[in-house]
Amino acid sequence: MSADLRLVGAALGCWCAAIGSLFLPARGGWALALVALLVVAAMFRGSRWIVAAVAAGVACGAAATAARVGERDAEPLRGLAARHATVRVGLEITDDPRLGRRSTVVVPARLDWVAVDDRRIAISARVLVLARDRGWLGLLPGQHAVAPARLSPPDGGDLRAALLSVDSGPQLVGAAPWVQRGAGVLRAGLQRACRGLPAEPGGLLPGLVVGDTSRLDPALADDFKTTGLTHLTAVSGANLAIVVGLVLALVRWCRAGPRVAALVCVLALAGFVVLVRPSPSVLRAAAMGGLALVALALGRPRAAVPALAAGVLGLVVFDPELAVDAGFALSVLATGGLVLIAPRWTEALRRRGWPRVAAEALAVPAAAQAACAPVIAAISASVSLTAIPANLLAAPAVAPATIAGILAAVLSPVLPSVAAFAAWVASWPARWLVAVAHRGAGVPDGLLPWPGGAAGGLLLGALLAALLVGFRWPVVRRWVLVAAVAAVLGAVPVRFLAAAWPPRGWLVVACDVGQGDALAVAAGPGAAVVVDAGPEPDPVDACLRRLGVRRVPLLVISHFHADHVGGLDGVLRGRVVDGLLAPAFAEPAAARSAVLARGIRATAAAPGSALVVGSLRIEVLGPVRPLTGTRSDPNNNSLVLAVTSAGFRILLTGDAETEEQLSLLPSDLRADVLKVAHHGSAYQSEEFLAAVRPRVALVSVGVGNDYGHPSPVVLARLARGGARVMRTDQQGDLAVVRDGSGRLAVTARRG
């Protein structure tokens, strides 16, 4: 037992020291390592071995990180990055390139050399390439390439020495290593074997088997994220456990001894790593998933804990940047949950009469999810209520899909027809996983809001630890059940009110004007700021009459499409309009001329400007700059406004599509109420919606429109983010209200 604790303490000390040293200059890390060594010497003399083990781990983590930080901050690369020098570089690709935001190819790499003024300087440093040319996407880890690049300083907090902006394609030097080429052949063969399958299971299967998500449907990926199943599409310890576990069972069935079993398991592990490519993430998963299995294969199940601790210690010393990698933390925590928590929960369930198979089926996903929950909450600022049931339902299908998929990949170069049959067999459990993800993502309020960041993660970790201890007593279990029910009922972010019309205390109303936009923001008794006018005069006039709006201190036209300006006469009918705010973008020109010809005093809509209308503060967020060459330039030059009313923030987005939404991301977009852009069309940025994270989402859309609005994927994404989604085509006029207790509520007028 003492050895277990010594290694665990050393691993935790190493991990924490590496995190701290990443944010210190190299000399700070060396100083920390020296102090830790002095503590080790003092504690060994006093026989305080637990403190000595922790201090020894601190010394290892601090020293390893300080050495890498010194490499990162060394000249001349640091100076070149600081002045954004343009150079020619030689690179070695270190991980799979991926497509990032704005079609940028993100390529992790290591510098071999830098050429400045015809002088080549040998430099070994970790960098990140941001390339515009999609030719970078096909590169394999281990491939060497040459390219001109502009250097920039890194963001900090990791071991990258510079960011490289590259406009051209790579000039390849030699070929990738044979291991990577062999893995590429098998991965491509698996993709070919899956071509005849339906789109969703066919795109999911390569992700399950080898972590290749290039064909994974984005909507399905979102549902996997919501239901806590994302780990299935990334190579992890679970994938390795399936493969090595099957091999171990076969070896034991053949009555092989522990040493032979361990050797065969290691060989199977190495073969699987070759198949999925030995990138850093795969090697990490191999270490985390393989150590415990090898210990068990040797007949020493108690060695699983020190093996896990040794793996953490060795990996962090080998690559200190893993200390701040969320995937590494999840791998360690999931393995720890399976080793430490799952057996206890399994035995507890068996004492209550559960069969072993059923007890393990529940305990394993629950233990892994409980161990990982604090990190997931810190990253996503939410807690999933569907993760454990979804993982429980998914578990029986994962192993058959993985094993049949591996057979398809291995057989694809030599027996393509047999490989296609194996892929078809694997598709049936994959279809079950697709169904679980879709049904789980559709559960109302399946994601509960939670404080994000380190504070939120620590809070949830402390709460779970207290529950694990307190659950031994029946009274605690009863109170936890009551609290859980209360939390779920209280998690509904916005109440739905049934009230007379117009509702008392209304802040903003989305008028039901058919396939178009018209909104009114309360600006005092009988007054409202009107944003857009819908396609026809009568519907917007009727909506404003129902609200008692007689004066419009400001009319906002987000852009000049007919479904936003066609009803302008309805706004002007019998009302005083004091001013007009419209975008500078002049298309469609005829509609713009017709609006300006009304003679309403116009105000310039410059980005960053602000207006005060009564108690309202209106900020112009976009367009940040004119956007041309997009799918719809008028839509992507819509006015985007943030209106503050009664302490609540309302984001009005016109028809802004993905391009304009992405251009706004540096701005503060957080809002309580979102008018969903472009009638809820599919042209929405996931990053934009995540940045807004509204409590109420209003969708102004017409019944039975021909455009497919709104997109079910967008609506589901908003709902999963905690928003109450309201639609004019289903519920009529929509009003967001500040109720008597000062809270946000929502109501609708039907008919």
Image (spheres, helix red, strand yellow):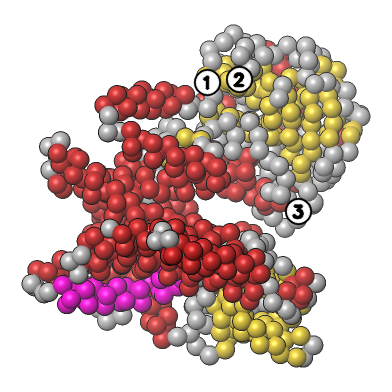
Q: Does 267 appear in magenta?
A: yes
Q: Position of residue 37 (x, y in %)?
A: 52, 68
> Is 416 left or right of 111, judged from the image as shown?
left
Q: Which mark is residue 743?
A: 2
The amino acid pointed to by label 3 is Leu
Q: Are marks 3 and 2 in contact (CB under 8 Å)?
A: no
The amino acid pointed to by label 1 is Arg
Q: Which residue is mark 1?
A: 495
- Considering only order in the chain, which callout, 2 or 3, is on the residue closer to the N terminus? 3
Q: Does 568 appear in magenta?
A: no
What secondary structure is marked by label 1?
strand
Q: Position of residue 659 (x, y in %)?
A: 67, 52
Q: Answer above or below: position of 430 versus 386.
A: below
* Mark 2 neighbour density, 10 Å: few (under 14) some (14–19) many (20 or more): few
Q: Which residue is mark 3?
A: 627
> Is 416 left or right of 176, judged from the image as shown?
left
Q: Position of residue 716 (x, y in %)?
A: 48, 39
Of the two numbered discs 3 and 2 in the rendering, the one whose residue sits closer to the viewer: 2
Mark 3 and mark 2: Cα distance apart in space: 38 Å
Mark 2 and mark 1: Cα distance apart in space: 9 Å
Of the two numbered discs 2 and 1 in the rendering, the one whose residue sits closer to the viewer: 2
Which of the 4 image quadrants contains residue 51? Answer: bottom left
Q: Answer above or below: position of 747 versus 94.
A: above
Magenta span: 258-285
Q: Are marks 2 and 1 in contact (CB under 8 Å)?
A: yes
